[in-house]
Image: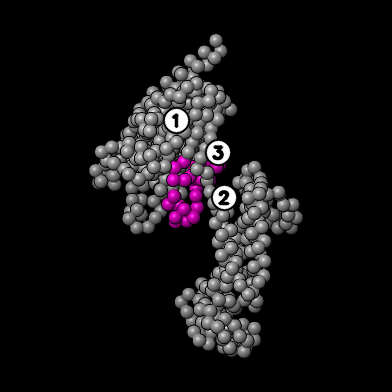
Amino acid sequence: MTTGDKFRCPLLGHPDHAGCAGGKDSRALTCQRCSHQLRTGTANGHPNTQMIAEYIQRVTGAGPATLELRTPLETAARGAARAVVDQVEALGRRQAEPDSMTALRAELAGLKQQIANRARPAPAPAAAPVPDAAAELLAEVRGLRAMLEDDRKPENALWLAASTLGRYKQQQAPPGFLELDQEDNLPVGLACLPDPQIGGSGTAYNLMIRDAEIISNTEGLWPLCPGDVVENFITPGKLAAASRGNVIQPDLQWDMAKDWIRRMRPKRPGDRRRMIIVPGNHDDFSISMASVEPLREIAEDLQAAYLRGSVARITFSFPSGTRYDIAFAHKFRMHSTLNLTHRPKQMIRFEAQWADIAIVGDRHEAAWEYCRMSNTDRVVVACDTYKCVDFFAASLHYSPARAIVPVIILSGDKKHMQVFSDLESGAAYLTHLRQLAQRGASA
């Protein structure tokens, strides 16, 4: 650009600027109205100009000599659209692969090896066929690319980019349901785990290890974790002070969480059981603070079921035709100090009328109850916590937790639910029932 060319101020978008106050450097441009200056990727004269100029250069991908000066809206539109195009195209193609995480790790490992060896990149493989949903997204991506080439209304690309990315994120969200078809009519059990709260000084780590061992060795016993797997106090303000009571820092808390989930995997080869997890508010601190979801990555890596939604739905179906529907959530409103099973009952009433069983965590006060609602027999459970010593809860006059793990046994040949108040008794009785059923089947 030479002196006298018209341009838009890259910071405030003032129109119809004539002149360039760059002196000998023709690439040093100054807005004649606000005096903001952009000089070869360096900005002066305003507290935020350095950051904004670097951002403009980064999102447009242009070098200092070819940097296009546009209004902030135009620049944001093009930057957002380009980012969405790249993300949706790359991830949309991987939807067709059976294990996208494994494929992605392989791609990254190959790329790192090429960089280390300074090798010439291999030719890109042919694009894999994509499912219909991904194909629709890619069609919108092509529309985005066309809009980016149209200088008349680049702002339109921002709106389409938002719509496209929103649809894509909805498709990528963890499911809110899980269907488990059993191969036989042997009874199964649900271990309603307490909120783990890994990292806290008052967490009963010895009980966590003991319970994981029992679950791993008990065939037919499915662990259900109601979230708050880690303390994860990474938020500023009031909750940050709570981190002073942690004995393990957040990064190591996730390592311990992964090891704990791994310990619950079945010992016997061919056993199809896996942990079922709904995330809690402590787990989600990582999303609000850093836009990452470590618990989901851990669950996928260990083949655990990771469910989201206001209320997750789990279905156990047996060859006999017997079916159980479980409503599972970390939180639900309408807590009652005088009636600890009020929350799971209201979850059935307002959001899960289909549920035979309702399980809720978060409040750290264990309770369970048989009840009859709308002419249907149900079981409702409020989960405990492994954080047996909690000074914050004590200051609010909550009762100390006892790390209770209720076990719900589901009959396979007929609809019948039975609850045990502790894990050891429930696991032992489940093993006894399965052995009796196996002997009867072989007789």
Kindly identify the amino acid type of the residue bearing the numbered disc 3: Gln
**Mark 2 crowdedness (10 Å alpha carbons): few <14, some 14-19, many ≥20:** few
Can residue 213 be found in the magenta stretch?
A: no
Q: Residue at x 44, y 50 (%)?
A: 284
Kindly identify the amino acid type of the residue bearing the numbered disc 2: Gln
Q: Which quadrant is home to the C terminus?
A: top right
Residue 10 against residue 234 in the figure, above or below: below
Cβ atoms at labels 2 and 3 below 8 Å apart: no
The circle on residue 303 is 3
Residue under label 2: 171
Q: CA distance from mark 2 to mark 1?
A: 29 Å
Kindly identify the amino acid type of the residue bearing the numbered disc 1: Leu
**Mark 3 crowdedness (10 Å alpha carbons): few <14, some 14-19, many ≥20:** some
Residue under label 1: 190
Q: Residue at x 37, y 26 (%)?
A: 420
Which comes sooner in the sequence, label 2 or label 3?
2
Badge 3 marks a residue whose secondary structure is loop
Residue 355 against residue 393 in the figure, above or below: above
